[in-house]
């Protein structure tokens, strides 16, 4: 059986009050700028935190590499260094200057080749 609607129903009265109050509730004029400023500040803080973490990891890795490299390098008389090659063989460099200049020359040659290839592509 269907019950008739009671005009004095407390739930209906509350719903009427809520609907009437909906026209009175409005955001303040500075709400959006405050929210945007808070979001910007949070983003900057998060970015700074991320950069600090990156710097810490980079420092840790570089420190680890430097420590392991310095530990493995033994300078016997100041001119010879033990070197571990990529293929697993090891040898001693008697003239460090010749090796370092060979590296410079190989980089120069690489740059010349890259410049030549870029000129061909243009």
Image: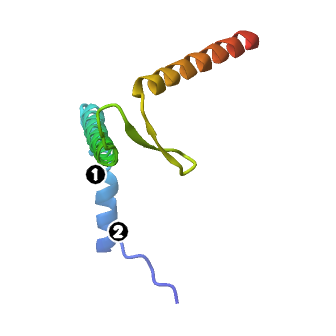
- Residue at position x 52%, y 23% from top? 102
Pointer 1 or 2: first along the chain: 2
Q: Quadrant of residue 55?
A: top left
Q: Which residue is mark 2?
A: 12
Q: Quadrant of residue 70?
A: top left
Q: Which one is nearer the viewer's eye here, 24 or 6?
A: 24
Q: In the displayed structure, would residue 67 be above or below residue 95?
A: below
Q: Measure how far apart labels 1 and 2 are at the Cα level.
A: 14 Å
Find numbered disc 2 in the image and state the secondary structure of the residue it sits on.
helix
- Residue at position x 28%, y 58% from top? 17
Q: Which residue is mark 1?
A: 21
Q: In the displayed structure, would residue 33 be above or below residue 9?
A: above
What percent of the width, then of the height, locates residue 12? 35, 68
Using the image, tell me which numbered label, if any, was put on residue 45: none
Residue neighbourhood size for the residue with mark 2, other residues' Cα within 10 Å, grouped as few (<14), some (14–19), many (≥20)? few
Residue neighbourhood size for the residue with mark 1, other residues' Cα within 10 Å, grouped as few (<14), some (14–19), many (≥20)? few
Q: Which one is nearer the viewer's eye here, 5 or 11?
A: 11
Find numbered disc 1 in the image and state the secondary structure of the residue it sits on.
helix
Q: Nearer the viewer, mark 1 or mark 2?
A: 1
What percent of the width, then of the height, locates residue 80? 37, 35
Q: Which one is nearer the viewer's eye here, 38 or 103?
A: 103
For residue 55, side relative to residue 107 (left or right)? left
Q: How is the image coloured?
A: rainbow
Q: Is residue 108 visible?
A: yes
- Residue at position x 51%, y 44% from top? 85
What percent of the width, then of the height, locates residue 1? 52, 90
The C terminus - image quarter: top right
Asked whether disc 1 touches disc 2, contact meaning CB atoms under 8 Å apart, the reply is no
């Amino acid at each position: 059986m269907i019950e008739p609607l009671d005009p004095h129903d407390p739930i209906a009265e509350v719903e009427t009050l809520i609907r009437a109050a909906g026209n009175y509730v409005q955001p303040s004029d500075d709400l959006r700028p405050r929210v945007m400023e808070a979001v910007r500040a949070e983003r900057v803080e998060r970015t700074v935190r991320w950069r600090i973490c990156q710097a810490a990891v980079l420092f840790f890795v570089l420190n680890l590499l430097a420590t392991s490299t310095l530990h493995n390098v033994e300078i016997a008389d100041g001119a010879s260094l033990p070197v571990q090659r990529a293929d697993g063989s090891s040898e001693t460099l008697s003239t460090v200057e010749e090796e370092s200049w060979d590296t410079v020359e190989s980089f120069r040659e690489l740059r010349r080749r890259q410049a030549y290839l870029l000129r061909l592509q243009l």
